[in-house]
Amino acid sequence: MTVRLRGHHLLCMLTFVGEGYTPAFTANYRRLAERLSAGEEIEIVSGPDDICAPLLPEGLPHCLSRSAVARDETAAEEIGRLLRIPIGEGTKIVPDEKLLRSNFKAGTIRRACEECEWSELCGHVAGNGFKDALVGAR
Ligand code: SF4
């Protein structure tokens, strides 16, 4: 099995602390967090992914928006540069979370976070050393 993630969710998974758009969204995200924490492989997809899935029946346009797609591209570019691999649709990876987190905290892979409504929360999670984050072994 793989967890299907869009590009910018490689960032979002680092700071997920159980908050989100709807109860169904966060319940699903918690299950995915467990799978990611267990080391399950990630497959990069284009557009809505396993995290977005519960929002789609509710007709929320966010997951299909141009800004979300732009975020995917920016995150894939920055993370790909960091990991020295091209990241795009079909890429399969188990990323080094520590490396991603240290760079997230340093701000070197956070261009995709610009103007995101969750940016303050995610900055706070990073500032606290990700101690409340649900993805990853601690
Ligand atoms: S600020 Fe937005 S895009 Fe960045 S990690 Fe948080 S939720 Fe994801």
Image (cartoon, rainbow, N blue to C red):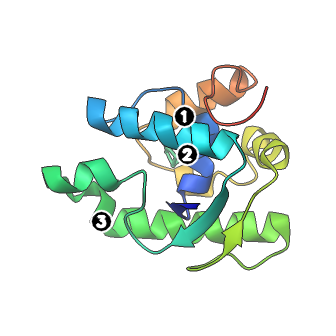
**Residue 73: image x %, image y %?**
55, 72
Q: In this view, does 109 lie to the left or right of 134?
A: right
The answer to whether the residues at label 2 and label 3 have Cβ atoms under 8 Å apart is no
Residue at left offset 57%, top offset 33%: 122
Q: Mark 2 points at which residue?
A: 12
Residue 16 circle label:
1
Q: Position of residue 114 (x, y in %)?
A: 52, 50
In this rendering, is residue 117 above or below 80? above
Q: Which of 34 and 47 is in front in this view?
A: 34
Q: How many numbered marks, from 0 up?
A: 3
Q: Dot 2: within a 10 Å radius of its alpha carbon, few (fewer than 14), some, or many (20 or more) residues?
A: some
Nearer to us of marks 1 and 3 is: 1
Which residue in the protein does label 3 denote?
Answer: 65
Q: On the picture, is 24 further left or further right than 71?
A: left
Instruction: Compare marks 2 and 3 and give the one earlier in the sequence.
Output: 2
From the viewer's perspective, tell me whether residue 82 is left or right of residue 19. right
Mark-to-mark CA distance, 1 and 3: 21 Å
Residue type marked 2: Cys
Amino acid at dot 3 = Ser
